[in-house]
Every structure is written in C-alpha cells, then in structure tokens.
C-alpha cells in the first residue's frame, strides 16, 4: 500500500511546504529585486523613452521618434570619442592584466608577510576614482606637483616638463594612474581563480617533468578561463565607461584628443542641454557594451564554440 493511500494529506502538505518555501525565497530576494528595479530597470526605460524625444533642460519635451539615433550617424565627434575610447580600453586592459597577473601569482602562495603585500597592493582600490583623479592631478602638476619638480630637482630633466600639455605624456599618465588604481582589484579576482586550481594537478605535472611555463599554459590558464572572463569583462566595461580621470585631470585635452564616449555624452546632456540626444548616445553605448561582453563570454568560456 502506497504512502499516499495511508496518508492522503501528504501531497497537500508537501505542496503547502513548497509554496511556503517559495514565498520565503521571494521575501529574501525582494530587496535585490527592488534595487534592480529602482536603479536599473526604471532608469533604463526612462533613458530609452527620453532618447525618442527632443528633451531640453527647460521646456516641454517633444516626441521625434528615431531622429536622435539618425543624428548620431553624422556626429563625427562622437565616433572620434568612441574610437579613442576603444584605443584606451585596449591599452589599459593589457596594462592592468600585465601588472595584476604577476601580482596575483606573487601573493597567491603562502609566504612571510603575504597579508601585508595583499593589503598594500589592494589599498588604491578603496580610493574613489574622483579622489584618485584629484590626487594624480596634483601629482602631475608641472609646478606644484611631485613628478615633474622631482625629476627636475634630481637632474633627470633639463627643465620642468608639463606631462599634460601633449597627448602622449598625458595619455600614458592616465594609463599609469588607472593601473595603480585598478590593478589590485583585478589581482584579487585572479588570485581567487588561482587558489581554486587543485594543487595536485601542478604536483602531478611537475613529477611528469613539465616546466613552469608548460604548467602555466596547459593547467593554469585553461582552468582560469571563467575567472579571466569575469576579470576581462569588468575591466573592459569599466574602461569603456571611463569618465572621471579624463574629466578631472585632462578636461578632454589637450585639444580634445582625450574625449571619451561617456565624456561626450556628458557634454551633450549637461553642457549643451540636449538630454534626448544624450540619452540616445547612452543607449547606443549600452548596446555596444552588451555586444562586447557577450563576445568576450563566448570566446573565453567556450572557445570551441567559434570553430
């Protein structure tokens, strides 16, 4: 005789228990749902709606359909800013990983003082980007800063050099500042990936005579694919959305050569007061960012899928 026949109320109790568990689960995730709704879904919908309007700062908005999107095609300044943003993203991402990966390898293994090293390398991350930009704006000042006067005082240069006067020194100064600020965060992500690799695999490969480089290429990198995907997506997304450092330190200069896509959106929205056009630019940048993230996920998480 089945348990259901003996206890006919058992299915009803199980259904009631499952329903109660689902309700409890909804209660737990309700704050997260509310945050996503208030700070992402609703603003995204409002931005999409604004992009279909001629939306001045003062006055009534006027519906114009896709006219703002058509205007983007002829906005040479936006495409130039987008090109510079991609160039900056490639350079700074390579620089961040070039610094963060060796640091992660260095602090991953237990050693004397490793806790202090981890803290020291991660410390710049806790500084806000605006605060870090203000700090480096002072450090790079040609007269009252640190780098140029120090180099002149030590006899490394014949005169004080304004590192922000021309494109190349200004650009690479920003790269150094961002690497100093962000590399510690990427280091922690990569360290977690390294620590998740079973040590037995490296020991077995070492016994089989595999060199450190071979173990790194055939064990470490393949098993860190998902971690690398996460770190790369965060780095690329943060770089494409770069604004603070270029606005605070360079103001888009010299000669508007360091205008980023977000800087141009800010300019159109809050300097020219074309909020509808700025919203359209934001939607285009969002689509580009989503496409790039999906491509990175596909390549890094399942490279065979492209073959």
Image (cartoon, grey):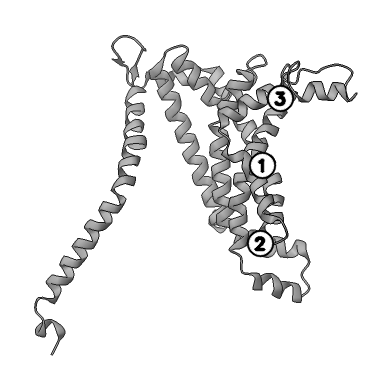
| Pointer 3 residue | 139
Please report contact status of discs 1 and 2: CB closer than 8 Å, yes or no. Answer: no
Relative to the observer, which residue lies in front, 118 or 219?
A: 118
From the viewer's perspective, tell me whether residue 146 is left or right of residue 295: right
Q: Quadrant of the N terminus?
A: bottom left
From the viewer's perspective, tell me whether residue 299 is left or right of residue 52: right
Rendering quarter of residue 226: bottom right
Residue at disc 2, secondary structure = helix
Please report contact status of discs 2 and 3: CB closer than 8 Å, yes or no. Answer: no
Q: Residue at x 80, y 21 (%)?
A: 149
- Earlier-in-chain disc, 1 versus 2: 1
Q: Residues within 10 Å of mark 3 (few under 14, many from 20)?
A: some
C-alpha gap between disc 1 and disc 3: 21 Å
Q: Nearer the viewer, mark 2 or mark 3?
A: 3
Residue 220's disc is 2
Q: Residues within 10 Å of mark 1 (few under 14, many from 20)?
A: many
Residue 142's disc is none
| Pointer 1 residue | 96
> Residue 288: image x %, image y %?
49, 35
Rendering quarter of residue 97: top right
Is residue 120 in view from this perspective? yes
> Residue 136: image x %, image y %?
67, 26
Rendering quarter of residue 307: bottom right
Please report contact status of discs 1 and 3: CB closer than 8 Å, yes or no. Answer: no
- Earlier-in-chain disc, 1 versus 3: 1
């Amino acid at each position: 005789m089945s348990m259901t026949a003996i206890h006919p109320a058992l299915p009803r109790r199980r259904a009631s228990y499952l329903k109660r568990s689902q309700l409890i689960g909804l209660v737990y995730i309700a704050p997260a749902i509310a945050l996503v709704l208030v700070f992402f879904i609703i603003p995204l919908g409002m931005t999409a709606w604004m992009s279909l309007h001629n939306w001045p700062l003062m006055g009534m908005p006027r519906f114009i359909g896709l006219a703002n999107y058509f205007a983007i095609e002829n906005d040479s300044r936006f495409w130039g800013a987008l090109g510079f943003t991609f160039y900056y993203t490639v350079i700074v991402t390579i620089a961040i990983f070039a610094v963060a990966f060796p640091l992660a390898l260095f602090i991953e293994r237990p050693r004397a003082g490793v806790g202090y090293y981890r803290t020291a390398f991660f410390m710049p991350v806790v500084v806000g980007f605006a605060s870090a930009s203000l700090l480096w704006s002072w450090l790079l000042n040609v007269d009252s800063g640190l780098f140029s006067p120090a180099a002149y005082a030590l006899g490394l240069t014949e005169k004080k050099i304004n590192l922000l006067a021309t494109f190349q020194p200004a650009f690479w100064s920003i790269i150094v500042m961002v690497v100093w600020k962000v590399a510690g965060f990427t280091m922690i992500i990569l360290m977690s990936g390294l620590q998740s690799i079973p040590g037995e695999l490296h020991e077995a490969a070492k016994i089989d005579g595999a060199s450190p480089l071979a173990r790194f290429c055939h064990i470490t990198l393949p098993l860190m694919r998902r971690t690398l995907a996460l770190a790369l997506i965060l780095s690329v997304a943060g770089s494409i959305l770069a604004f603070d450092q270029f606005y605070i330190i360079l103001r888009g200069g010299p000669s508007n050569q360091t205008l980023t896509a977000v800087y141009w959106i800010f300019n159109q929205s809050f300097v020219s007061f074309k909020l509808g056009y700025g919203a359209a630019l934001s939607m285009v940048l969002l689509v580009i960012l989503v496409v790039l993230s999906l491509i990175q996920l596909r390549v890094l998480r399942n490279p065979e899928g492209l073959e």
